[in-house]
Image (cartoon, helix red, strand yellow):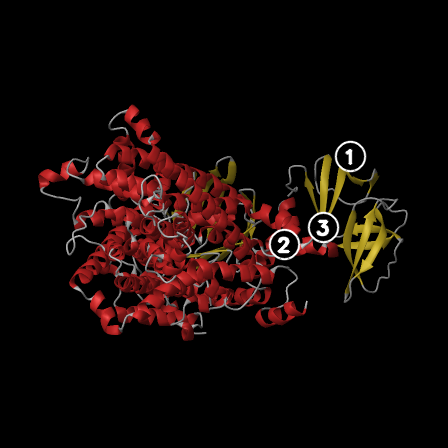
Amino acid sequence: MTVVPMVEAELFEPRRNTDTVVARRLDVREDPTWARLSVIAVTVIFLGVFIVLPLLNVFAQAFAKGAAAYYGALSAPDTLSAIRLTLVVAVISVGANALFGLIAAWAITKFEFRGKNLLVTLIDLPFSVSPVIAGLVFVLLFGLQGYLGPWLSDHNIKIIFALPGIVLATIFVTFPFVVRELIPLMQEQGTEQEEAALSLGASGLRTFIRITLPNVKWALLYGVLLCNARAMGEFGAVSVVSGHIRGQTNTMPLEVEALYNGYQSAAAFAVASLLALLALVTLVTKIIFEAHIAKGRTP
Amino acid sequence: MSRMSSTAAVIRRKSVIPGFEITLWTTLFWLSLIVLIPLGSLALKTAELSVAQFLDVVTSRRALHAFELSFGLSFAAACVNLVFGTIVVWALVRYRFPGRRLLDAVVDIPFALPTAVAGIALTSLYAESGWVGSLLAPLGVKVAFTPLGIFVALVFIGLPFVVRTVQPVLEDIDKELEEASASLGASRWTTIRRVLFPGILPALLTGFSLAFARAVGEYGSVIFIAGNLPNVSEIAPLLIVIRLQEFHYADATAIAVVMLLVSFSMLFVVNALQRWSEVRLGRRP
Amino acid sequence: MKISLVGISKRFGNFVALDNVDLEVRSGELLALLGPSGSGKTTLLRIVAGLDWPDAGEVRFDGEDALNRTVGERNVGFVFQHYALFRHMTVFENVAFGLRARPRSYRPGEAEIRRRVGTLLDLVQLNWLADRYPTQLSGGQRQRIALARALAIEPRVLLLDEPFGSLDAKVRKDLRRWLRNLHSEIHVTSIFVTHDQEEALEVADRVVVMERGRIEQAGTPQQVYDHPRTAFVHEFIGESVVVPVLIEDGEVRFDGRSIGIDPQGSPNGAATLFARPFDISIVPTSSENTLTGVVKRVHGIGPARRVEIALGSEGSGTIVEVVALRSQQWRIGDFVGLRPEQYRLFTHAGRGAT
């Protein structure tokens, strides 16, 4: 090996920090104080103005005409039927997607097969489709001038402008929520435990109920939570397929729109505040669930 | 059992876990029913139009303007979210300050809040009588019922995408890299610029694409604060709705197809970006 | 460059990482900080680098206070345990990083940078990898690039944190030899941290044995092996036979009986006998006072036999392993005597009589 001329080049004199005599005893990974303060300030202001302020505004406007008006708005018959409809739609959609989610996650994570990636991409499709388009496709199928329109009206079946249409559109937009939460966890957990149960003589169904389900319960609940929040709050897709008939085919978000466009702003915000509360509860529960899921992961 | 061996052997290796057939076919059935067939009707409808008719619809003055508005404002909003999202995620991940956890939860609000609620909240806030609108009015700035209002709404709903996509990547960066850079004599700014930033760049671009894709299709948050005047402040999704109400299904479909093409291109870009970053940063050979 | 550490102390919460450590590192020497995990060796290294700060004490580079400077200003070359190569940069860009990161007035021109990087890559014999990315390299190659990168800034001291820890045994052996050769060429003061005593003894000019935040002994590999100063060093370095004994009336006793060896000036009381397995002879028992025991197992092939002996007349005590010549035939059940030819006695305090 050749001798390396380490002394050849002039020795680099290390830079001396002439500002301070005593070195700043900073962790090498810390940013200077002025930078930290500005970044934090910008963060607080940006989040405060763009996110916190609108949220606060919801509640401020809801109570703008006083508490009596608030409760009055919530107990109006149209509002109550909107709440009822929203709940019914949510229960059906979330239930369907939860069941589907479990089945799909089982097929995807416990087996190897070609086309798996394609399947997952297809399941994810509803995420990248605008809600309006989600509503559009069902109108194309079941609307009065849709492909099945004439057949449906012959048989007196109403899908668009009625509950079934709203349910279908909601199921579409919330389709991937539960599956997406289940897949990573189930993939990580692998098939060992199920194989052990089977080797001990348990049937497939029993294995699924006694072994798989308990292992994924937090991810399942989390997916259900997110699915529900979206199902109850969906506006675009439902707006297209609903008839906007107050008291009949208006979900809560649509009722909010109806009230707002009808210049009953405070009432609109009152109903909106319920949805906002739902969002906050969802967020809080999400944080709790995330802690549980983190614990459930293999270390 | 023979049915199992024929299909099973074709599709996959033998597995001791039961239920493959039934779960896979159920999945495919449900997927087709809810997603594929409805989306298929879109394709079918589009096929009814000749190419000339299709181009007529999507290049009409009103449609072009709607596209310009939707894509243009979505892009601008995603850019703003890129810049401020980076600042926010930096503060949330690298610094400790009182209220940090709360702010972290706040970032999720646009995800969780129903779009109609966000829509009316933003409108009343930025209207001339609202808290912010009243501050801006003397300066001659009108936000509600103008494209600027649409922009604000799109920034609102896009922010979590950038932050949440970059956050795990920033959290995972090896601290030894920063120490190495410092030990080699780099200044703090150089370390950030040349070592840390390239590490999060793929995630930033992914977050940007997601924010953009979401903004393009957004309806509920925007429909109240936009003026909804054709050729001025009408977004593409609204145009689709209007055409539907007029029973011009084919027109609505044509516009939807253009929007879908843009969304899917974005999806493709995001996927490619993620794969590129995984190769570059060595998580995949 | 000479490094002086005086009175270095550091705690992390309640845990004492370093306890009043003094150390002189001579200019140009290759020094090993050796010890088990938690001994403080990595903390000490990081303090020298400027990646950590001591609670008390002085660090001087050639007499100048180093604590006054940040890690970047100290001009140290630090090689991290997991290499910390920049994955988004090529090998060339990694090595050039330190040079390019200098402020404009100190930065060499591009041509000069290319030349220097080329020389360094030749030095580590990896010039052909210049355009590859770190993820395309093997562990051993990454380690050498990390070293080249640290050397690029012409550091006054080279600091290596468990440099070979995450490599295969064979690669480790090769790189050890390679590092030793490299050092004899470039003569930069170097300190490396390891928990592998074989590595330290083979590579270093001097070995500093650390335990629980203190320096147990500092000396050449020969000194540390042949003349361990404390029980810990004796046991940590090389193999040891350990027998608890009692010093009474100038005699060394085991199991109540004198074992006929010189107490080496140790005070009365409990003590521990340390010896190397091949420094103990097995002798037939006789009327002499010796350490006795019963052969339990004989194994090993080659020039030496390993004999496991249970101490005590009943053969029920501690089991020690001793090396015997092949010519000696010992069988299981044989009642034998053990005579330590070379040994140390460490009293309760852990330090032997000098």
Q: Amino acid at mark 1?
A: Asp
The tag on residue C275 is: 3
User: Quarter of the image holding residue A11?
Assistant: bottom left
Q: Which residue is mark 1?
A: C249
Is tag 1's residue or tag 3's residue first in the polypeptide sequence? Answer: 1
Q: Mark 1, mark 2: which one is toward the viewer?
A: 2
Q: Secondary structure at mark 1?
A: loop
Q: Who's the residue at 53% across and 42% down the image? A: C213
Instruction: From the top left corner, tell me how far across and down residue A122 is, in percent.
Output: 44, 62
Mark 3 belongs to which amino acid? Ala
Q: Amino acid at mark 2?
A: Tyr
Residue C279 horizontal/vertical position (percent)? 74, 55
Numbered disc 2: what chain? Answer: C
Left or right placement of residue C60 versus residue A193 in this view: left
Which residue is pictured at 46% across the width and 50% down the height? C45
**Place of residue C50 in the rendered image (x, y in percent of width and height, measured from the top left):** 39, 48
Identify the mark nearer the N-term, 1 or 2.
2
Toward the viewer: B152 or A259?
A259
Does mark 2 fall on the same chain as mark 3? Answer: yes
Compared with residue C125, is residue C212 higher up or lower down, i.e. above or below? above
Disc ID at residue A122: none
Label 2 Cα neighbours within 10 Å, binned few <14 / some 14-19 / many ≥20 = some
| Of the pair B265 and C204, the residue shown nearer to us | B265
